[in-house]
Image (tube, coloured by chain):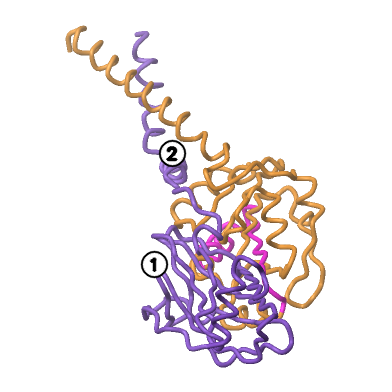
Amino acid sequence: MSKAPLWALGGVILALAGVSIWLDRTFREPAIAPAPNMAAASIGFPAVIAASFPDTEGRPQSLGQWQGKLLVVNFWATWCGPCREEMPIFDAMQSKYASKNLQVVGIAADTAAKVNEFQKQTPVRYPLLAGPTDALEFSKRLGNRLGLLPHTVIFGPDGKQILAKLGPFTQFELESIIAENLPK
Amino acid sequence: MPFRTLLVSALLAVPMLLSPTVSAAGAAQAEPELLESEAAFRFSAKLLDAKTLEVRFAIADGYYMYRDKFRFQAEPGPVTLGKVELPKGKVKIDPTFGRVETYRKAVTARLPITGLQPDGKLAITVVSQGCADAGVCYPPMTSKATLDLTAPASGKSLSSILRQ
């Protein structure tokens, strides 16, 4: 191979690399900056791990018990169709990555009785907690200014917020984020 | 060769272009701006005659309301609501809830009322719930309207309605 085409090839690849880095930076930012329907969170990780919601048996469950894991907090409700459709994805992820320190937790804007009824029909392998009045308030403090569901906030093992999202994930989207942020 | 090193690092950087995070975050960026519930589902109420109150929700494009989520309540005491017949909605086979009826564009319901006094007030409370096609649902919304039959602005027409 003569020198000139090799240089050209190198140049093209370098340009591609530059574009890819630019794209990566450009498109990564919205994951951190609030999306149009989100406000800045008024509470941080200390308030998250201090929060506690009752499980379907009525026992208070502190979010702090999952500190150090990759924590996926999903706000949902039994009356929310898109939320229920999304739950098998969380279930699959919890099942697949439980041993790698992923913890999904569902906090319902519902009574424990409703959540219990739901769980009997549609069991999931991650804890479902109930906050009939305070789940939405808590979700709003995490930036969900319109109080819409589903709302999911992902915290890294170090407590840093990785992502906040309104609306359901696709499995590909969620798994990519999980795979990239699992505790090393 | 110096550019062999460059070549390797460049090749390593290329897959980032196709990395899942990029497409995931890219999708999040395309998220449409959602309306406040009061703007997505615009509520109004008016008295049609002494026995009928009309309640209406104008629904923004891309939003819908569930027929079985409507609840109506009238106050004060002497005023009672009869059985509310909601119009038929569009039947949708929901993967989660089975057969559901939803409304788009608008829904108007006529509420039969009894016990309305000519000089009284009527407070109506409507609980409703809707979602956006973007894949999110609004929490149950409470809308209220007070029709003051003695108020100077509306009193005349409402009082005359009551005398019909």
> Looking at the rendering, which quadrant does residue B150 occupy?
bottom right
Q: Quadrant of the N terminus of chain B?
A: top left
Q: Would you say residue A115 is visible in this rendering?
A: no
At 54% from the left and 82% from the top, the residue drawn is B161
Q: Is residue B33 left or right of residue B75?
A: left
Residue B101 picture location, percent across and down: 42, 80
Q: Comparing marks 1 and 2, which lies closer to the viewer?
A: 1
C-alpha distance separating marks 1 and 2: 36 Å
Q: Which chain is orange?
A: A
Q: Is residue A45 left or right of residue B80?
A: right
Residue B33 picture location, percent across and down: 47, 48
Q: Which chain is purple?
A: B
SS class, disc 2: helix
Q: Amino acid at mark 1?
A: Lys
Q: Which residues are magenta?
A: A88-112
SS class, disc 1: loop
Residues at marks 1 and 2 on the same chain: yes
Residue B105's label in the rendered image is: 1
Structural crowding at the residue carrying mark 1, measured as other residues with C-alpha within 10 Å and reported as few (<14), some (14–19) or many (≥20): some
Residue B144's label in the rendered image is: none
Q: Nearer the viewer, residue B23 or B50?
A: B50
Structural crowding at the residue carrying mark 2, measured as other residues with C-alpha within 10 Å and reported as few (<14), some (14–19) or many (≥20): many
> Looking at the rendering, which quadrant does residue B75 occupy?
bottom right
At 53% from the left and 43% from the top, the residue drawn is A35
Q: Is residue A72 depicted above or below A163 in this figure?
A: below
Chain assignment, label 2: B
Q: Is residue A30 left or right of residue B91?
A: right
State the residue position of label 2.
Answer: B22
Residue B82 picture location, percent across and down: 58, 92
Residue B78 picture location, percent across and down: 72, 89
Report if residue A87 lies within the magenta region. Answer: no
